Every structure is written in structure tokens, then in C-alpha cells.
Amino acid sequence: MSFDKDELRDEYPDGTVRLRNPNIELMDQDILYHLALGSGSHDLVEMFGDVKFVCLGGTPKRMEQFAYTIMAEIGHKLPCGTTLHDISQFSYRYSMYKVGPVLCISHGMGIPSVGILLHEVIKLMYHAKVRDPVFFRIGTCGGIGFEGGNVIISEEAVDGNLRNIYELTVLGKNIQRPAKLDKRLVRELKSLADPEDPYDTVTGKTMCTYDFYEGQGRLDGAFCDFTEADKMEYLESIHKAGVVNIEMESLAFAALTHHAGIKAAVVCVTLLDRLKGDQMLAPKEVSDEWQQRPTKLVCRYIKRYLQMKGRLSLDGHGSIAVKSPRRFKLVQQESENYD
Ligand code: URA
């Protein structure tokens, strides 16, 4: 049997995302319900056509902070008098911020939440005719043999039985999708780790579970039917099999991006070493600083890409540009005193 070469590609020859669902093209409009966007109501090409990077992370607050960080890193300036705006605020589900070519979106907790979001974001890429997007999940995890504060780039995602597949039930049948991540992207990210960083940046297998407590072998959930010895035997065995961290989204993230032909990576910071305990004991300001670490690595990647493409905006058109700080202050004081 011979195939048209294009039939085997996951994307169209111009790099735009190919949807593996023939129904969408036949629909009058496609409502991306959980994003509060639609192909009939919004000009998605105009709004999102220039996106290159899609960064996903757990909480709305973290992704808003990430948006401000990447804005400073790539020198993106907002037009004077404007501010970053949550594009999906009326969905009351996910938050979305756009900073030039970077889309920052919260994915909530766990596989179902990230899965629903990815269906809609992948369709958004298709409707907006985005070319060759790169997706990142930036998150937190429990380390296996790594103390809190270390950065882990996932080589692949595995389930609780160490299978590199995302399994879901569709029409009563079990469907299995490989949870693969882009190997080259892993190497590129790793190469951007600064040897001066006061923490390690390592690569390895990421175990993704459907639960934080029993599913991750914690003794401190509301229920626990195993002993500490059982827990340690399991954690040691997955450690031996190459698992370096555990979290709750990578399986669906890797499988759905891979199925859509989208290059993707998962970069997480460890909050504790699960070989030493279950509870997260680091003070908030410490864990807040740790959570900046995977962000920094992804920022470096995006910045380097834009630099290479000559797309780093350093001009500052439209933002408030101060010519003389003394006069600027005087004008501000004048305005404040004006009745
Ligand atoms: N996220 C997880 O899923 N597990 C941890 O132990 C820490 C963060």
C-alpha cells in the first residue's frame, strides 16, 4: 500500500497544525467553550496568528507572573496605557495571557483538566493558522532522589505502571496513545542550564499519576491501605527504572501534543524528595523562588529562539518611555496635585 507523503505528516507542508478530526472543518463555527473563544465570534488568525510558543502551567496566578516575566525577558512592550489582560477571563476555567508570540495559559490540576485544555488549544492553533508551535508545560513535581529546588526536564512520560502510554476510554473501548516528547528539545533545554545555577538541571523519566495521594504512594492522604515499607519498595523500584520525578499532567500533555504533531517539553521543579517524605515543608518564599527556576530555563529558550530569528523587540514603541526621570517625576507630581 502506498501513501501520499502528506497523508503521513502530522502538520500541513507550511507548518500549520493539521487537525485529526474531519468534523471541525464541516462545522459552521467552533466554540472553544473553556477558553471563552470561538471561530465564529473571534478573528482567531488576527488574534493568535503570530503565536510561536504556548506555555502551560498549573495556576492562573503563576501564568500571569510568567507572562510578566517573559514580557521583560523578550523586551515586549505593551501599547501605552494598556495592561496584560486575561483573554479567557469569562470562561472562569482557565486563564490566558498573550505576550507577542508567547501564549501563557493555566491548565489546572491533573490529566482531565490539561486534556480538555489541550483539545481546545490545539484547535485554536489550527483556527489561527499558527505555524510550528512549540508547547511547554512548566510545573512542580515530587523528586525521586532529588531534593526540593532541582529542575527536571522530562525525557518521556510514563503511567503508574511505567507504561509510556496515555490510556483513555472512548466509546467503551480503551485507546492508547504514546506519551512521547521531543528528544531534541530536551537536549536543547538541557544545554541552556547555567553551570552557575545553585541547583541541578537533569533529564529523566517522569511518572504521571491520576492522584496526588494514594496514586503517588503518599502515606498522608485521607486513605492509605499500604505500609511505609510498601511505599519505599515501590518508589525505589521506579527510581531504578529511571523515574526521576512524579507529577499529574505530563502523560496527557505528551500524548496529545505528540498526536497533534506538536513539538513539546515538560520542565518541572521538585518541591521535595519523595524518597525522604510526603509533606511539602519548604516555606512559601522558598518554594516561590524554586518555581521561578523552570520558568527561567524556558525563558532562555524562547529568548534565544527569538534572538536567532531577529524577533527580539528592543525598541519600545507604544510603552511609556522616560526621557528625563526628573521631569517625569515633576509631571507626575503636578498631575497628582491637580484638583
Ligand atoms: N506535584 C505532584 O504531583 N506531586 C508532588 O509531590 C509535588 C507536586
Image (spheres, rainbow, N blue to C red):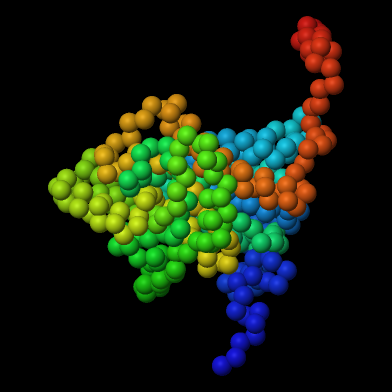
Q: Taking 328 as reference, is 148 left or right? A: left
**Residue lying at 52% horizontally and 61% vertically, measured from the top left:** 183
Q: Taking 327 as reference, is 239 left or right? A: left
Find residue 123 and report its horizontal and vertical position in percent: 61, 61
User: Can residue 3 be seen in the rendering of this structure?
Assistant: yes
Q: Taking 22 as reference, is 292 left or right? A: left
The quarter of the image holding the N terminus is: bottom right
Q: Is residue 200 above or below residue 51?
A: above
Find residue 110 and report its horizontal and vertical position in percent: 41, 51
The extreme bottom residue here reads 1
**Residue lying at 32% horizontally and 45% vertically, measured from the top left:** 145
**Residue lying at 47% horizontally and 45% vertically, measured from the top left:** 201
The extreme front residue here reads 195
Q: Is residue 61 above or below residue 39?
A: above
The quarter of the image holding the C terminus is: top right
Find residue 180 and report its horizontal and vertical position in percent: 47, 64
State the image quarter where residue 251 is shown: bottom left
Tally of marks: 0
Find residue 264 and report its horizontal and vertical position in percent: 55, 58
User: Can residue 107 be seen in the rendering of this structure?
Assistant: no
Q: Taking 172 as reference, is 66 left or right? A: right
Q: Nearer the viewer, residue 232 or 59?
A: 232
State the image quarter where residue 194 is shown: top right
Q: Is residue 66 above or below residue 167?
A: above
State the image quarter where residue 95 is shown: top right
